[in-house]
Image (spheres, rainbow, N blue to C red):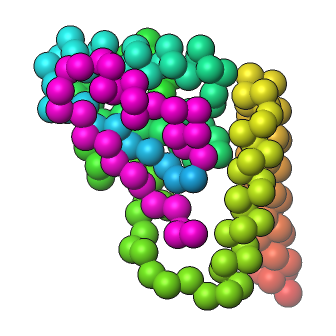
Amino acid sequence: MSLPSYKIFKIKGHNQQDFLEILNVEINLKQPIVIDVKGLDVDEQWNIIKLIDQYFIKHDISFKFPYPIYVLTIHEHGPSNIPLLKNEDELPIYFQKKETRINVKEMSILNKNKLLQRELQNAVSAKTQGNIEEYGHRHRLIHEKEKELNFYKSIYKDLKRKKK
């Protein structure tokens, strides 16, 4: 089992049947996916983006977890919820790692991660997505409050130090 790094699919032809063979229910189960459609015409790019979006809606799959899916295109925004990026430099660097040999501890963590990925795959994505967003919102709120608390603590320390 390798560490998760981006798997890039470069779409050069406009044959939608060939493209549908790339898409499967487990496409983002093992690693993050990048679909590069910049080699196509503008209209064909939109058609492929719509096709990807429809596939995920039809099969009730999330493009955010267990690993994200990104589309490289010349378009900035579109009707799709899938993140559209202009070049590979905009991809999150978290998954941009060189593959190396992994040790025993890392292997056990990856095996545990594999089980969790299967659980995520079996979950209903619409319900789970709402829970994940709520969980993320709460953590961002805690982070903001903690940051504010640390700011006030630093002011208090400064005032206490100047008072002496």
Do we see residue 117 in this rendering? Answer: yes
Principal SS element in the magenta part? loop
Quadrant of residue 100 within the rendered picture: bottom left
Q: Is residue 2 magenta?
A: yes
Q: Residue at x 52, y 69 (%)?
A: 2
**Rendered view: 90 above or below 131:** below
Q: Residue at x 40, y 34 (%)?
A: 22
Q: Residue at x 39, y 74 (%)?
A: 98
Number of labelled discs?
A: 0
Q: Is residue 126 magenta?
A: no
Residue 131 image offset from top left, x and y in percent: 82, 33
Residue 145 image offset from top left, x and y in percent: 81, 50
Q: Which residues are magenta?
A: 1-29
Quick check: 107 left or right of 8? Answer: right
Quadrant of residue 96 within the rendered picture: bottom left
Quadrant of the snapshot with the N terminus: bottom right
